[in-house]
Image (cartoon, rainbow, N blue to C red):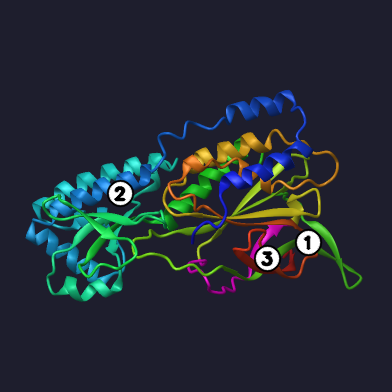
Amino acid sequence: MSTRITHRALAGLACAALALVALPVTTAQASAASSAAAPSSSTSISTAEKIQDTLARKTAASLGDAPWSAHLRTASLRSTTVDLLELSRRADAPAARRMESAVAEANKDLAAAKGLGAGTGSLLRIRLADPSMRAGLAKGVKPLVAAAAQDDDRASVTAYDGAGHPHKLDANRTPDRPVYLIDIDTSKALAAGLDILDRELAKAGLALPALQKPIAQATSGAAASGVWTTKITSIGVADDQEPWFKGGAETYAIVTGWGQDGVPRVDTVQMPYLDDDGKTYYPNQVLVKWFNYKYNLADVVLMEDDGDTNYKALAQAIATALLTVTDLGVYAPLVDAVLAAIPDSWYTDDPDYVDSWYSLSRQDQGRRNGASGNGWMTVEPYFVEQF
């Protein structure tokens, strides 16, 4: 998926919205906001892709070792994507030992660039850029190696041969020669990243634990214990043809509203099924848990991680923005504050914003189109009874 609206344009909207709701913060809020100040983004600009590019060059050089090259070829033909660290550990070839060290170091650097812990594990994968390349690889055609890029609009992609020579490939035409792509396991990165995001927001008081006591609801004249939620019955995003070099992406939602304590609340919802543009999915997934909120309205931002998201920095930026917003006793949307907290410079592709939904209520039922026209979802109220 790719962005159809820029963060700078959204930030302009956000400034207008925040002007209506921002008031001087309390001492406690100011302290929390200060402690959540976003780190410099200079270390994360294109960092993930630089790490992938360096590893692509090293991987290409390693293919001169025939046993290792054959091991990699066999694994790539058997599976659509391969854990490069695990693969190098299982191989006996001398080049595999060098690759094991290089991949381990790259994984460490990548986790740091994404604000993830050292225990995240292996994130780097290798795969063929396109299924049409399988025949050539099986016949022994020497492959090139490139980094899976995140920028849809580039004109060329740099790939490396076994001698380390760069080759400029047309970004708009799938190469005839096999190309390995060094990619990121975005599913694994997202799961770890959302855990970081939730914990960092909780530290700032923006993602407090859910209320433990269920709310009594009346149904058919009798009291039934449980909670009201909003469930997604179907969802889709606009059709967009992805180029052959594009890296993988994982989608998630940021749900915002005013907590029961009058402080902005942020909850994250992972959507691992939302893989392809132009396709309708039927997840029956709970999106909003209304017992967490003070008002009968919430906002939703649909995001994707396609490589360069720094989750810790994202959480700190959101906290800094939201802790300056004060509850005036009436509902005020928080979507713009969240979007304004995401600088363009943190992303190589500016792809991470997909769409947003304002003022979703508990009673909403039916199709809701996103504000940017990129996405839509069908929702319905869903009562979760207590056992």
Label 3 packing within 10 angstroms: few (<14), some (14-19), many (20+): some
Going 46% across and 49% down the picture, which residue do you hit? Answer: 192
Q: Position of residue 264 (x, y in %)?
A: 71, 42
Give, as a single range, the part of the protein colored magenta: 273-289
Q: Is residue 281 magenta?
A: yes
User: In the structure shown, which secondary structural element does the residue marked by tag 3 occupy?
Assistant: strand
Identified by mark 2, the residue type is Gln
Does residue 294 appear to the left or right of 351 in the view shown?
right
Residue 212 visible to an observer of this rendering: yes
Find disc 1 in the rendering and name its residue: 362
Viewer-nearest of labels 2 and 3? 3
For marks 1 and 2, the one nearer the N-term is: 2
- Which residue bears the numbered disc 2? 52
Residue 268 percent across, percent down from the top left: 60, 52
Q: Position of residue 313 (x, y in %)?
A: 51, 38
Q: Main secondary structure of the magenta part?
A: loop
**Which residue is identified by label 3?**
369
| Farthest residue, direction right | 221
Label 1 or label 3, whichever comes before in sequence order: 1
Q: What's the residue type where badge 3 is placed? A: Asn
